[in-house]
Each structure stands twice: as structure tokens, then as C-alpha cells.
Image (tube, helix red, strand yellow):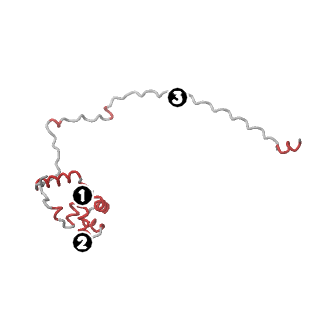
Amino acid sequence: MTNPSHGDSIFIMKQDLFDNPNKYALSLALALRRKRKERKLSMGRLSELSEVSYGSIKRFESTGLISLTSLIKIAAVLDSAPVLEGLEADETAVRPTRKPTAQKQEKRPEPVKKEDKPKTEKKPAAEKPAPKPEPEPKPAPAKKQARDMDVFML
């Protein structure tokens, strides 16, 4: 068996990153938690300084899940250079917007105004069946005299 070359080990690491991103996210979260504790910052104070919600920080430290924007803010507050390495703010970077092409510039039909709508005749409501007459109440049974007396009279 041959020893893997340096290139093979990088491929294996990249494959592991791809297959287990949550493991690496949690590892990053734990590293940033250590930095927070080294600086004696509570999660609440880090939340105030980074403008990231307390809940997001708590979730990040326990699961590794966080938005990229929040991660950058936390890393900036903790002066975590490895996380920020290679990041540069591009002043010209803006969210891309879609420009309508010549084909997509077709005008939409104007909405029909109420007064322009043709009036449709209302259909007569379906006739409802006549309500069933309520049954006449049955007369209450005549009250019987005390049965106990009938028993004793025998």
C-alpha cells in the first residue's frame, strides 16, 4: 500500500468537509466559544457587541448553525482572524438586480376598472325548501298519584 501524497490528503479533507459540514461547523462554533470565554464575554454581551441575537449565538454554540452574516459579525468582535481570513469588503459589491431584457419588457395588460367591467346578471338564488313544521309538543303524562299508597292498599 502506498502512502497518500499531500494532494490526496487535501482531497480526503475536502471530501470530509463536503460529507460532514455540520462537524466542521460545530468545531468552528466551539473554537469561537473558547475565544468568547477567554475574553470573559457572556453570550449576552457578545450579542450586544456583535448585534447578533442571543438566541442565534446560543444556537450557534450548541449546533454550529448560523447565518454567514452573523458569523462574520461574531468573528469580528472576537478578533478571529482565521474565520475572516481572505475576506475583503468590496465597496462596489451590491446585491445583483435583474434588468428587464427587451423580450421581457412587454407591457402587462391594464387592470380592468370597476366601471369598465361588464355587468353580469345575478343568477336568482336557488329556492330553499320550505322549513319543516315543528312537531306539536306531546302533552306531558298525567302525574300519577303516589304509588306507595297503591302498594299499601293491596
Residue 144 in the figure: left or right of residue 127: right
Question: Which residue type carries mark 3?
Answer: Lys
Where is 13 relative to 39, above or below?
A: above
Residue 87 in picture, x, y percent from top left:
14, 59
Assign a secondary structure to mark 2: loop
Residue 102 in picture, x, y percent from top left:
13, 37
Mark nearest the camera among 2 and 1 is 1
Residue at the spot 87% in from the left edge and 44% down from the top edge: 152
Among the two numbered marks 2 and 3 on one chain, the one whose residue lies closer to the N terminus: 2
Q: Which mark is residue 91?
A: none
Q: Measure the alpha-carbon separation of dots 2 and 1.
A: 21 Å
From the image, tell me which residue sits under label 2: 39
Image quarter of residue 79: bottom left
Residue 59 in the figure: left or right of residue 126: left
Among the two numbered marks 1 and 3 on one chain, the one whose residue lies closer to the N terminus: 1
Residue at the spot 21% in from the left edge and 63% down from the top edge: 75
- Label 1 crowd bin: few (<14), some (14–19), many (20+), radius 10 Å: some
Among the two numbered marks 2 and 1 on one chain, the one whose residue lies closer to the N terminus: 1
Question: Which residue type carries mark 2?
Answer: Arg
Where is 103 relative to 124, above or below?
A: below
From the image, tell me which residue sits under label 3: 128
